Amino acid sequence: MLVRDIETALSHTDQWEWKHGLALHKGAIVHLCRRIEANSKKFQVLELGGGYSTLFWHALLKLDLLQVQVTTLEHHGAWAKELAVLLEGWEGGSIYNLSLKQISEEQSESLFASPKESLGRWTTVGAVVPKELEDHYTIRNTFYDGLEQLSLPAQSIDAMIVDGPHGNGRSFAYPLFCNALKPDALVLIDDFDHYPFLPDLGRVFHYEELYREAVGNKRWVLVRLQGMRD
């Protein structure tokens, strides 16, 4: 995408005054979009954690700068509701308010051992995380429940933003969505050095690192997948 189009969408997004402090850094959004080739097809985004970036995708579509379809997963009920109100009538996106569940270390390893079968296994394991524990930053092996609702077609996702939930369980996105991601999909990982998110990605996919920021609270990395590991 052209830089001026990205800046236009960012300026439009700022009118919403999204004030939550955990928003994805604007620089990460810019670097992702600069690698998007705008054309007639819809660009499919899977977004783990909703917020400022969700509003940005809406702006791109509303301003006719990119044909984009966004699937957003958000466990925080208040945020999901706020987004739904702000984006009421948006045909370019779906916001799923999903609870979280937690699995054991053994069950975690099984997801990575057989990633192509992990989504079917996900519905049979784990326990729902109590609401009062959902926002603990150090919670382990926790990811979104109810993924069977998404029905994502095989190799349909052009880009995945990994910005939720809290804890090391973000890495479960790699095996659980491996069938839905295109072999060369872009993956943007926020706070990539809080847990072994990159090494975990390497357990499922080959990838090329495109750019990273690791200064202060700007700690994100953008990669392009290069197919699954055997």
Image (spheres, rainbow, N blue to C red):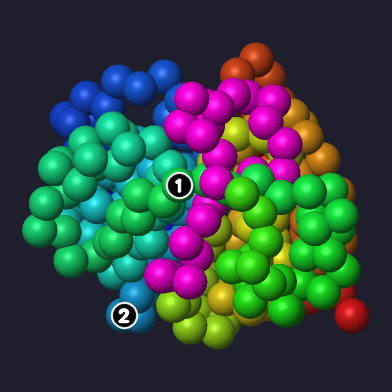
From the top left corner, tell me how far across and down residue 24 is, in percent.
47, 34
The verdict on residue 179 being magenta is no
Q: Secondary structure at mark 2?
A: loop
Q: Which residue is mark 2?
A: 40
From the top left corner, tell me how far across and down residue 67 is, in percent.
29, 69
Residue drawn 82% across and 40% down?
196
Q: Residues within 10 Å of mark 2 (few under 14, many from 20)?
A: few
171, 58: nearer the viewer: 171
Q: Amino acid at mark 2?
A: Ser
Q: Amino acid at mark 1?
A: Ser
Does any portion of residue 91 appear in the rendered image? Answer: yes
Dot 2 or dot 1: first in sequence order is: 2
In this rendering, the answer to whether 116 lies above or below 27 is below
Q: For residue 21, which numbered disc appears in the image?
A: none
Q: Which residues are magenta?
A: 128-150
Quarter where residue 19 is shown: top left
Say which of marks 2 and 1 sits in front.
1
Q: Secondary structure at mark 1?
A: loop
Residue drawn 68% across and 19% down?
215
Quarter where residue 197 is shown: top right
From the top left corner, tell me how far across and down residue 153 is, in percent.
48, 83
Q: Quadrant of the C terminus?
A: bottom right
Instruction: Tell me the distance, in whole angstroms, between the alpha carbons under discs 2 and 1.
Output: 35 Å
Whether residue 54 sits left or right of residue 193 in the image: it is left
Q: Quadrant of the N terminus?
A: bottom left
As drawn, the residue found furthest toward the bottom would be 154
From the top left corner, tell me how far across and down residue 40 is, in percent.
31, 80
Whether residue 124 sits left or right of residue 195 in the image: it is left
The verdict on residue 141 being magenta is yes
Q: Which residue is mark 1?
A: 99
